[in-house]
Image (cartoon, rainbow, N blue to C red):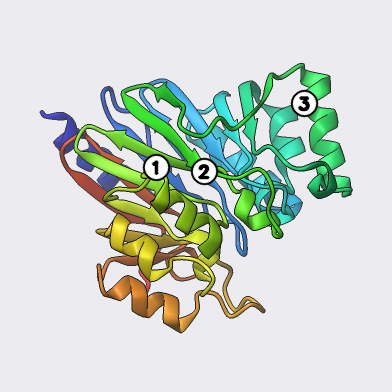
Amino acid sequence: MGVFLLICFVIELLKKPEVLPVEGGLAVTFIDVGQGDCTLVTAGEMTMLIDCGEASEAGKVEEYLRGCGVSELDIVVGTHPHSDHMGGMAQILRSFDVGKVIIPHLSDEDVPVTAFFDDFLEAVQEKKIPLTEADTGSIFQLGDARCKIIAPNSEDYNDLNNYSVGIFMQHGANTFIFTGDAEGVAEKEMAEAGMLSHADVYKAGHHGSDSSGTEEFLSEVTPDNAVISCGEGNSYGHPKDITLQRLAEYTDKIYRTDLCGTIVFLSDGEELSVRTERSAA
């Protein structure tokens, strides 16, 4: 049985969207954490967690990871220090063995004075986890996947969202892009720096806000699939209609955690398959 058929067989057996590691395969899981972001990438025996949602979601994330058989995280990325992305990070760091943590460089005046961020730094010190600042343009391997840090491209912004660590990931013929809450300013910088190219899967920036997923950005990324992480009935009105319209110019495969729950993409290096926790209908 080929790897791709084996992956599909595993999916049919599962009652929940947890994905078992498959040799040579890649799983990208957009965990439903309400109005927040949390993505688990499993490549062979290596794992990377990008954000983890609010502190109130940390228990759910921990349970989900353990249900997937995850006992350690090789890389944890905190895209930027907003609580809907890093609120539960301290609990995750204390609950798992972590190889290293990547966060963006922040100007002194933008380092947040918040309880969750202080707790995050304390957890890093307690566990003696290497903490590194994102080195834009650098490349690292996650199993068979090649990851490139594509943002941030400046050292000082007026909005924490634009400090977001961006990652472009390639697994064989399949490509993924994650940009946190990067808005138009940061997206323009990525384009001008030559950091963008076609992505089979685009994790929509800033929960589908109209400040992200600009026309210039999407014309470079030309996504085949888009994933929007947002909470049901959220007070921000995410995703915005204009954002959905922009995305619809490129794809009709738009998945939303508020409608679909947790969303899993599987790659065998050639083909992609997707599984959702529930139907969007």
Instruction: Answer with left or right where residue 151 lies relative to residue 108.
Output: left
Instruction: Answer with left or right where residue 101 lies relative to residue 248.
Output: right
Whole-angstrom CA distance, mark 2 to mark 3, is: 23 Å
Query: Residue reaching furthest left?
Result: 1
Q: Is residue 161 above or below residue 98?
A: below
Q: Which residue is mark 3?
A: 124
What mark, if any, has residue 243 been given in the picture? none
Whole-angstrom CA distance, mark 2 to mark 1, is: 20 Å
Residue 14 percent coordinates (x, y): 35, 45
Residue 199 percent coordinates (x, y): 29, 50
In terms of image quadrants, where is residue 26? top left
Question: Residue shown at 39%/76% (left/top)?
Answer: 244
Look at the numbered disc 2 and give the secondary structure of its residue: strand
What mark, if any, has residue 28 been given in the picture? 1
Look at the numbered disc 3 and give the secondary structure of its residue: helix
Question: Residue shown at 55%/75% (left/top)?
Answer: 238
Instruction: Answer with left or right where residue 230 lies relative to residue 84.
Output: left
Please, what is the three-letter code of the amino acid marked with disc 2?
A: Ala
Q: Which residue is mark 2?
A: 151
Please, what is the three-letter code of the amino acid marked with disc 1?
A: Val
Q: Nearer the viewer, mark 2 or mark 1?
A: 2
Look at the numbered disc 1 and give the secondary structure of its residue: strand
